[in-house]
Image: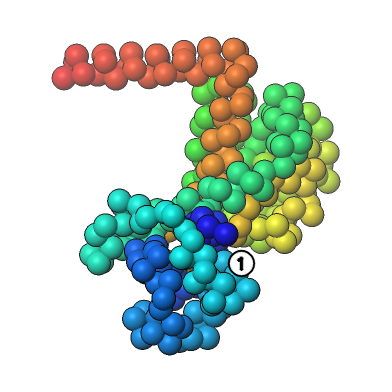
Amino acid sequence: MDVIAAIEANYALLSKTEQHLALYVIEKGSELANTGIKELANQTQASSATISRFVRKLGFKNYEHFKLALAKDPKQSPPLLGGVSSPVMAESIQVFNTYQAVIKEAQASLDKEMMQRLLDSIQSAERIFIYGMGSSGLSATEFSQRLMRMGLTTFVACDDHMMTIYNHILHKEDLVIGISSEGETVEVNQSLKMAKQNGAKTAAITCNRTGHIIQLVDYPLITGMHLQITEFINSQFPLMYVIDVLSTLLLEDKRYRWNIERTISAIYAIKTNDDREH
């Protein structure tokens, strides 16, 4: 088993202490093949129990199997890690590796059939309503603006008052998409439930495969892992990945691409005129 690949695949699932341990392993590589568990514990200020949990999370039976894999691993530490002793570089690597792990998990977890069903529903809907609160409301706003520029009739609601208003004008030709990282936002879930009762088709984009939101909709899209993050790492990252994929697939339709090119040209023309006036 490739140690570096195992770290990349599981990095976002590690605790903060285990993540720092992972960075140390990446930096030292095969140099640790002859290092005992107690010695590694002293070098990293981690307990032997933490190291044992760490290697098991990576898929190794025990620390000895982990060392054997390190000894066989031909890979050298990536150039990016050369300055890992710098706090700035160490943190930048940590965020970079987290994002890599998140995007791999999001891609691997995509239900291609469900995504196609949602795409078909977006294209056939008379109107599209997108709901989200907090940070997910920002993702909802971004998605709605993209769809509007493609020529689709789209509305966004980032508070429960607007969701209630929209829910009372829905009909069976409408589609309501709820965006929620955790899948437990009460206002969004209640609004999706009401939208379905009013006859609209419903969809959800969420990071949490056990979130209540997926039980409420016709088209649930799960983006992989729900990030348990205390640092300032963007929890919307996997959601935006799915939104980017949906947007890219929609733009394969020449009508949508033509519309978005027209809107870009119109905005550019306004900006050019404003610059001339000043």
Question: Measuring 58% from the left and 34% from the top, which residue is drawn there?
Answer: 245
Quick check: 271 left or right of 52? Answer: left
> Label 1: which residue?
59
Report the label total. 1
Q: In this orientation, does residue 138 appear?
A: yes
Residue 65 occupies which quadrant of the picture? bottom right
Q: Is residue 67 above or below residue 91?
A: below
Q: Is residue 63 above or below residue 19?
A: below
* Colouring chosen for the image of the structure: rainbow
Q: Give the farthest residue toward the left.
A: 278
Question: Measuring 24% from the left and 59% from the top, which residue is drawn there?
Answer: 83
Quick check: 109 left or right of 274? Answer: right
Q: Amino acid at mark 1?
A: Gly
Name the image quarter holding the N terminus.
Answer: bottom right
Question: Measuring 71% from the left and 50% from the top, which residue is drawn there?
Answer: 191
Question: Measuring 78% from the left and 29% from the top, which residue is drawn there?
Answer: 173
In this view, the residue in front, 152 or 57, is 57
Q: Is residue 152 above or below residue 10?
A: above
- Residue 178 is situated, as x and y percent measured from the top left of the image, at 66, 46
Q: In this orientation, does residue 167 appear?
A: no
- Residue 223 is situated, as x and y percent measured from the top left of the image, at 63, 49
Mark 1 is surrounded, within 10 Å at the Cα level, by few (under 14), some (14 to 19) or many (20 or more) other residues, namely some
- Residue 240 is situated, as x and y percent measured from the top left of the image, at 53, 43
In this view, the residue in front, 6 or 70, is 70
Quick check: 3 left or right of 110? Answer: left
In this view, the residue in front, 155 or 3, is 3
Q: Which secondary structure lies at badge 1? A: loop
In this view, the residue in front, 98 or 25, is 25
Name the image quarter holding the C terminus.
Answer: top left
